[in-house]
Amino acid sequence: MKIVSIIGARPQFIKYFMVSKALKKYKIKDILIHTGQHYDYLMSKVFFDELHIKKPDYNLGVGSCERDWQIKKIFKRSKQILVKEKPDAVLVYGDTNSTLGGAIAAIKAKVPLAHVEAGLRSYDKNMPEEKNRVLTDRLSSVLFCPSKRAVLNLKKEGFRQAAIFNTGDVMYDALLYSVDKAKKKTAIFRKLGVKKKSYCLFTMHRQVNTDNKRNFEKIINFINKVSRDNIIVFPMHPRAGKCYKKIKARFSGNVRIVKPVGYLDSVALLAGSRCLFTDSGGMQKEAYWLGIPCVTLREETEWPETLKGGWNVLLKNYKCFKKPGSRREPFYGDGRASERIAGVLIKWIKIL
Ligand code: UD1
Ligand code: UDP
């Protein structure tokens, strides 16, 4: 049995990392296409190096460009590879342009498509991610959902029940697998000159925040206010870096802007922080799993379970920094999502 995975952006390397381990365990041949959507060392290769992910079998080298053009390049180049490789199925992950480009390629090459992290909805159609996830779900034959709510979302939209599986979240698998190793990392704290629990972590990269001057400035004002009483560590995503150069507002001196970090350092920094401010999807959940209070710098979240018990708060509802006392429910599975995915693929491909 042969599966082709198509990935290209930072969180997808982390998702694939665990799924690839499970594919190996089930002796499924695993071909990897890297679209090249992310290409800087700190946005791509660092993950392959530190997580020992295999070298991609193909790199499409699409780079950065306008969304429609990027998706088109991904699907055209992936399709050629799929026609040659003739896999039993294609796996795409999450909600990026690489996800949708890969999904279209599978359909055009007439290869069955499976979507990891299916069924999530923010119900904000202006977000490219929302378009990518809705369209990818529609094109998929098998939908691997990270939560009960994701399954319900698909049911509400009339998806065929038989193809939907609640596997749990592969990012939870990755966190459980890596957290002990990450917590032993100390160099990053020395490098940044911060002690554990003496700082808050901050990340942002959503277009709605970076590419809109008013929203970017609103977030800068908010972070500067919080930074009066807290050191803020900000591993700056390249999209945010590019947009920051174009605006006048500046972060205060208590905001330590650094380059993006690798996954283990990211988990170490999060686990060692007092609080997270973010618009990242993956980091909202990681904060939840690690018991770190989070303020989500968006109007809504596709991970609403994390809002329960006050562990995650949307910016508009944020009043002050406080640690929630309530217990965290296991909304996203038990850390064995990747194995379930591999198990389902084996059975499902046999009945095709
Ligand atoms: C993409 C995904 C987003 C995901 C994020 C994870 C889409 C529509 N967006 O957003 O869902 O949460 O990845 O990080 O697919 N750049 C570099 N070096 C790189 C990559 C990007 O400098 O290695 C710069 C380029 O100027 C580029 C910009 O960042 O134009 C944005 O990159 P892009 O991949 O389009 O979107 P992200 O914001 O990274
Ligand atoms: N992350 C990382 N380095 C960083 C910032 C984040 O390794 O400098 C990790 C983070 O721990 C999480 C994933 O990247 O596992 C989230 O990716 P991102 O925020 O880019 O995308 P999203 O989850 O919003 O799609």
Image (cartoon, rainbow, N blue to C red):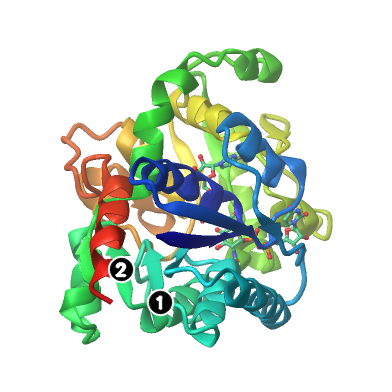
- Residue at disc 2, secondary structure: helix
Q: Residue at x 28, y 77 (%)?
A: 352
Residue bearing the label numbered 2: 349
Most foreground residue, 69 or 313: 69
Q: Is residue 319 above or below residue 125?
A: above
Q: Is residue 124 visible?
A: no
Q: Is residue 332 above or below residue 131?
A: above
Q: Residue at x 38, y 69 (%)?
A: 114
Front: mark 1 or 2: 2
The label number, if any, that marks residue 112 in the structure image: 1
Q: Is residue 157 left or right of residue 284?
A: left
Q: Is residue 156 above or below residue 45?
A: below
Q: Residue 53 is drawn in which quadrant?
A: top right
Most foreground residue, 127 or 232: 127
Q: Is residue 340 above or below residue 150?
A: above
- Residue at disc 1, secondary structure: loop
Q: Residue 294 is drawn in which quadrant?
A: top left
Q: Is residue 240 left or right of residue 7?
A: right
x and y, in percent, of residue 119 in the image: 31, 70
User: Can you tell me which quadrant of the image ligand 1 is in?
Assistant: bottom right
Amino acid type, mark 1: Pro
x and y, in percent, of residue 221 in the image: 62, 49
Q: How many angstroms separate mark 1 from mark 2 (CA)?
A: 9 Å
x and y, in percent, of residue 78 in the image: 64, 72
Q: Is residue 51 visible?
A: yes
Q: Quadrant of the N terminus?
A: bottom left
Q: Residue at x 80, y 59 (%)?
A: 247
Disc 1 packing (10 Å; few <14; some 14–19; many ≥20): some
Amino acid type, mark 2: Ile
Circle 1/circle 2 CB separation < 8 Å: yes
Ranked by sequence position, the earlier of labels 1 and 2 is: 1
